[in-house]
Amino acid sequence: MTLQQRRQQVLARINATGGLSRKYFITLAKSLGYRITIDEPEPFRAGSSLAGEKLLTFGQNLIEGLFKDLKPAHTQVVFNYREKTRP
């Protein structure tokens, strides 16, 4: 990460006063300059995956590391990135 990204991460962690709701994490991401959505999928059921779905995605270390550090212990964070669409 760049120095600026590390500084942002430190400030975000200092300012993180708690909260585990979807709204909390959406607001946290917005303060870092990201627009995100959070989906809570149903538990796995047979046939829920499709052929051709990505098994692994790569993204931004800043937001991923922060969310993984702050998430509730019983949850798993999965990041999927899309290209920014223009109006």
Image (cartoon, helix red, strand yellow):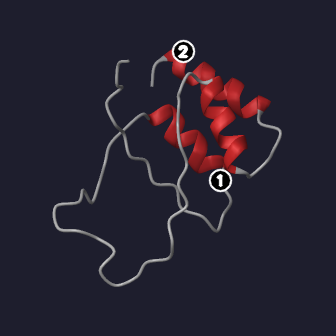
Above or below: residue 83 compared with residue 24? above
* Quadrant where the image shows the N terminus: top left
- Residue situated in front as seen by the camera: 7 or 15: 15
Q: Residue flagged by tag 2: what amino acid is it?
A: Gln
Q: Residue at x 54, y 15 (%)?
A: 4
Q: Which circle's residue, 2 or 1, is located before the other in the chain?
A: 2
**Residue position for label 2:** 4
Above or below: residue 36 compared with residue 44? above
Cα distance between the residues tagged 2 and 1: 23 Å
Q: Are marks 2 and 1 in contact (CB under 8 Å)?
A: no
Q: How many marks?
A: 2
Is 43 on the left-hand or right-hand side of 55?
Answer: right
Q: Secondary structure at mark 2?
A: helix
**Residue position for label 1:** 71
Q: Secondary structure at mark 1?
A: loop
Q: Residue at x 35, y 19 (%)?
A: 86
Locate residue 45, reporting x and y percent: 40, 82
Farthest top residue?
Answer: 4
Locate residue 58, reporting x and y percent: 32, 43
Locate residue 50, reporting x and y percent: 23, 68
